[in-house]
Amino acid sequence: MTAEHILKGVMDLNRSFLRIVSVFTAVVIFAMSMVGCGEEKQGDKVDISYISGNYQMIIDSVDEINCDYLLVYRSTASFNEIDAFVDLLEKLASSSTATFQICPDTLNVTDGNQKIILLGNTLYNESEESKLLMERIRSNNYYDYLLRGYNNTLSVTWMSKFGREDAFNYILSNLLNNDFASKFTPDYSYMYLSDRSDTPVVTIDDINIIQYSVVMSGSPSYIERTAAQRLVRAIKDATGVEVPLVTDAVEESRYEILIGDTNRGETYVTKFFATKRYAVAQYSSKLILRGGQIEATSEAVNRFAEMVETASITAAPLHVKANFCETGSISTYGGDDFGGYELTFSDEFNATEIDTKRWSVEKGAMVGYGDAAALMYLEPQAVKSDGSNLIIKTYLSNEGYVSGHLTTEDSFSFKYGYVELRAKFRATPGFWVKMILSNQNDGKENTSQIDVFNSIASNDTIFASAGVLPSDDYYSNYLKLIEPSYEAYRSGSFENEKVLNDDEYHTYGVEWTPEYLRFFIDGISYGTVDITAPKFKELNTDLYLDLIAGVNMTDQVAVDEDAMWPLEVCVDWIRVYQREDGSFVDRTVVPEVPESDNKAPAKK
């Protein structure tokens, strides 16, 4: 390796990676054949589908190559990666007088004078050499990346999406307009390695904490995410570095702080804990922060955050030794950790029968909503608890569609707080799943309703809404989202581009205050409704929980042959948190923290 330059230092990790509206909607590669043991053969033409404002920049044939620089990516790249590659392509084209195109690595480029930028682990030998070089220096560090020149080729290699984003930003900010062509020679090499301070403030088994990422489950609750964000801020205050906060959908790295029930194997070391017990435990190369329930997990996270904050304030380094384990318990959940809230209602559905003291299971015929409305039968046998989940089963019988509906109308209603449930289901034409807060059967002239979430036969869309509708004509008005008193917020693909309604667990929640409603998916806010206007006045009343699955309840018609009935909705738990005074502290706003004279300096 010649002229390899290593830059050490703290990068600004708060840079946002601008996403361009133009994305690939599908990438279908063929003209591949298998040679030997899994080797992909390159060809002169490949099939590629795309949506882009600059069609001429995305090519599928060697005959179309007509550019100064050709970007090449691996044909099996994920949707997220391809989105990032197109984003880089368009930024390069808009920032330079040079011309750029992009193609997959299955396109056989034979022109030896063509300058090529290899993005990630392509089929080209140069990509493999760069990857091996990075792994020899240090494997699985989130922010490391390498730019290495070859003859008319520049290889760009990274260890994670964070390193990829920083590498692309470095190309745009430092290389593009600074003799870019000279970097396509064996004399050029640039590697970024994130901070390796000799005197770290916090270590875990002698590894600097800045080499760790914080990993949550794929469907974190608002409480878990709030605690995780506090931990990330504490680490940044202590070290000057903002470590990544991700879900377990991200590829596993060596050093991780695991929060709650992740899919990492090490999580299960603490699985035996009782409901209100928690542990802060070092195991293998992971730090596990976990409790028997969400509130206990949050307490574990807050406990470790306090340890980090103490190290920062006192300038006394925190060294978490191998096999360290601290356990504790919580008697009640409250205080300043979550706005002084306490759990006022919950059902974990751990029994083998529905708790009829909490839930009323509806029975009878029900007419759906919209032009496709049809008769649907609500039957108690369609609702059950299997000792782990509440299950609502929807199926087609000889009489018609059968499904389940349950409410807390006779047992529990409330005003203001935070409501959340964890559930999974699969979208199918005509299938509707929703949880609402309502007073529909209270005999009032108008029905007040807050839809915690709605899923209507779409695998990537959830909408939440709120409104006051006439009780006499409730069903015909329900779907008129243009009503002045009815507002909806929709969410498509969410964090990490994961698809909703995909038969995987997600958490759905709403924060309800006298001033606003804020809706959440997997602990992330995606829409807010101001309810101070007069049209929302009647929302300031007690509402009960209402959970239902249905068929033909909208303008979308169920297709019997394709719908793959029966379908099930699985609900892991439902919880309501309230403050005694009815207020809610907005934990999405991070307060300013004054500098302390005793605070340890950030590492440079």
Image (cartoon, rainbow, N blue to C red):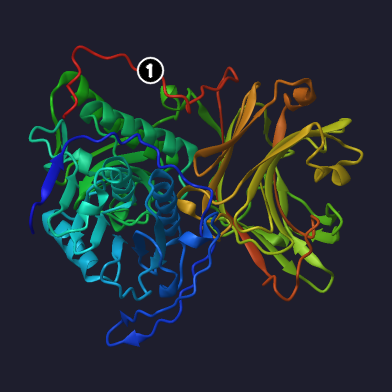
Residue with the mark numbered 1: 592
In this view, the residue farthest toward the bottom is 36
Residue 216 visible in this rendered orientation of the protein: no
Query: In what element is the residue under mark 1?
Result: loop
**Residue at image x 11%, y 47%?**
5
| Mark count | 1
- Residue 77 percent across, percent down from the top left: 39, 64
**Residue at image x 81%, y 43%?**
478
- Residue 114 percent across, percent down from the top left: 30, 66
In the displayed structure, 375 sits above or below 471; it is: below
Task: Decide which of 274, 306 is in the foreground and name it.
Answer: 306
Around disc 1, counting alpha carbons within 10 Å, would you say few (fewer than 14), some (14 to 19), or many (20 or more)? few
Quadrant of the drawing holding the C terminus: top left
In this view, the residue farthest toward the right is 472
| 167 left or right of 46 in image | left
Residue 442 visible in this rendered orientation of the protein: yes
| 515 left or right of 599 in image | right
**Residue at image x 19%, y 42%?**
194
In the displayed structure, 440 sits above or below 307; it is: below
